Image (cartoon, grey):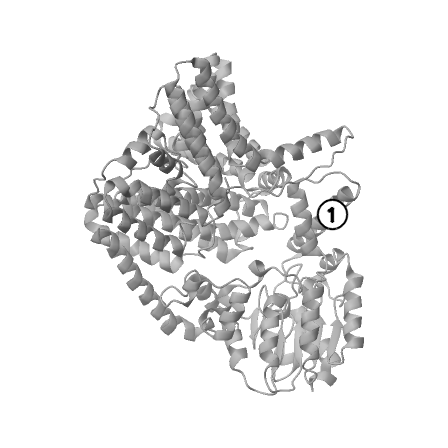
Amino acid sequence: MLLFFYPLLLAGVIALVIDQSFEVFVLPKRTDLDNSFKVERLLGETDPKEIPVFGSSKGRSSFIPDSLGETVFNYSMQKCNFDVIFFLLETELAKDKDAPIIIEFNARSFVHRPQHTIDLATFMPIKNNPSVVEYLAANDRLDNFQLVPGVRYYGSYVRYIRSLNRKETPNKIINRGGLFIDYYPGDRLLRRFTDSRYKMIEKREELETRAASGKPLTYMEDQMLDQLQISLDFAYNKDRIKKFEDMVKSHPNRDILMVFTPHHPSELAGLKNREKLYELMDHWNEDIPNLYAFDYSDFPLPDSCFKNSSHINLEGARRFCAVLNDDLAHLLN
Amino acid sequence: MLFNSLDYLIFLPLVVVAFYLIPNRFRWMLLLAASYYFYMCWKWQYIFLILISTMVDFYAGIQIAKTPDKKKKRWFLLMSLFVNLGFLFYFKYLNFFTENTAMLLSQFNIFTDFTYYDILLPVGISFYTFQTLSYTIDVYQGKAEPETHLGYFALYVSYFPQLVAGPIERSVRLIPQLKREPNVTSDDIRYAVNKILLGFFKKVVVADTVSQYINLVYANVDGTTGTQLYMAAFLFSVQLFADFSGYTDIAIGSARLMGVRLMENFKRPNWQENHSAYWANWHISLTSWIRDYIYIPLARLNKSKGALMLWSVLILVIIGFWHGANWTFIMFGLTNGLVMLTQRLIRNTKFAIAMRSNKITHELQKYLNLNILCLEAVYFRSVDIDMAHNILWKIFTEFNFSISEVLSLYKSEFLMAVFVSLLLWTTVLFNNKLKFKYNWAYVTTMLFLIIFLGQDLKNQFVYFQF
């Protein structure tokens, strides 16, 4: 029977050794591009002048802190929609400061899909922080084993180590949390990306037309239509928008700047309910004094300013930030 | 409860310890309670399906053996088939049939009000249904004695190591092992521990890492090239093998700890010279079930050469459909069947004999066979037929040998997938030659790999959905 238990004991020892090595050798090497570093920084940052930028990968590749001001820090993270932004915003608004907050938002910002949004690795080294634990639990992303030394980082080691390997190169610029790539995939590859999106749009049209004509959709088609609508349309989620607005209204001393960043035309082509988006932005500008919406979706950028059909590249970010800086100057200073 | 969960890592040692602390005559109670608890952790209501199947088949088995009247015997067999296949049909195939009937009628401009029934497929229903059916058929055919102890029979139907994803065991093999006093040696324990570790490694390190790349590619079929799709198809065969054989390894290891020897379900299936050999070594408990209870009876009906060919294709279509109620699975089975048929037809040609006689060309033949299997598995992985055809079309028209093209998208996920696939290959080779003298090194290495490279514990096994 001892033979059966000794691997369990050995597993415990190995787990603890890996856990401690990880804490000692890996965690201190995080860079300001790392998601967990960003969250930890936000929780501990007390500079009253810091202007945080929250957003998704679009935000990370669009806002160049150096172009916007000395005190700007880009906290944007991949797959970060309002599930995460609520948490970041709550944390920031709890601070005793008046600096404005920039939020990148896009058509899918208000989609509520925790499984596709909150990457646990984002919060890994600080998951013993009570507010993070509470937040993860509220989003059903916390397992009890994640609080146990030895296994708390299980499943995240590789992702984490992979994210450390981010060094600045001539065509990869890292600037206070922002990541800007000097890369254009070429006409052929970009066309492949955009064609893919146009096909999705066509498929949605086809399924919607069929459903409207009363012809039955198969279960899989029905599921596909749901997914296509989530991917292409503006997610007008009333409850989440209201929650966000209440949060903003309760802190009238903080200006919140909502920026819809430049999009490739293929991405906008599928945005069927665009008028809802405009209505919402108008409502913010007119009815909530400290909430400002800026629409750069149609910002004129050539294809060569895109890294792929969803993200702009370094050149695109430079052009965008030059204009943004002028537009926001009166609010940022 | 998932095998790859912390819950199971607590559950299994507790059950094993309790198993050895109590006398043999009470062990069936412990294992039955543990098995029901194991199943109820997922959705407790569905335990009633297992209970009904158990009661019906227990009763049917005894009645079949007791009555001398052949008509009555058949009636009891039909009752068992009706109940078990009825459950399977309702939970797994009802929507498929209603949906396709509605689609068919709509071709004739008859539009019916098709309703999709929101039915949650009970985990493992395809496995335990086939297992319990084999019992009644064996009793009917006189190959097995009816089990008169309801407790042991219930345990046979629900034995937790193999309840939700096999191996599909026959009563004549499993029930006697459950009854006897286990004779577990230190070699058995070592074997069991090694097997469980290998299973965890295959699942949480290999299958779950490889699936990250495959999921990304399949979520962006139009944005990826034929070469990338080919790589995803190739890696999917690794994922499928690692996932399913990983589950079976944990099942075999868990059972061995309590003195039960479950059958091996995989014997290096992917590296075989043709599809017949592949299916003889892949999911052996299912293919042997289909052979014994469907193919052989069909062959008895008509054993002409043409009929046997037809039956061969038909059973692969049935195997495909067993996997899921979707045309993709039917196509998966059909393409496998047709390729197997073609391979059989050309097997005795001079060219084929020459291929087999040379070691290099024979290995080449295995490689070619693996490629065909990977392409067929595109149907298995795709959401619908259109998607599968789109992928296959792109593979056939766009494939080239450009590594840079493969690495142009999802590079780190691809490299990790290749790395763990190579680890799997090394581990399987090493494991086959392993001597217990170096067992501590094997255990330590596997534990390190599982803890360090393991993925999230929430990923289900692919075969759980069947």
* Host chain of mark 1: A
Q: Give coordinates of residue A29: x percent, y percent.
A: 43, 74
Picture residue at 47% right of the left edge, 24% below the top: B343
Q: Residue B164 in the image: x percent, y percent?
A: 43, 41
Compared across the picture, whether A302 is left or right of A88 comes to right
Nearest the camera: A248 or A119?
A: A248
Q: Position of residue A295 (x, y in %)?
A: 75, 70
Task: Check the picture and name the quadrant holding the C terminus of chain A.
Answer: bottom right
In the picture of the structure, the residue carrying the numbered disc 1 is: A202
Residue at horizontal 41%, vertical 32%?
A: B131
Q: Position of residue A173 (x, y in %)?
A: 57, 72
Q: Quadrant of residue A84?
A: bottom right
- Compared with B125, A180 (above or below) is below
Instruction: Determine whether B170 is above or below A112 in the image.
Output: above
Which residue occupies 43% across, 40% down? Answer: B165
User: Does residue A114 appear anywhere in the picture?
Assistant: yes
Amino acid on which the number 1 mark rests in the picture: Glu
Name the residue nearer the viewer: A194 or B81: B81
Q: Is residue B66 left or right of residue B437?
A: right
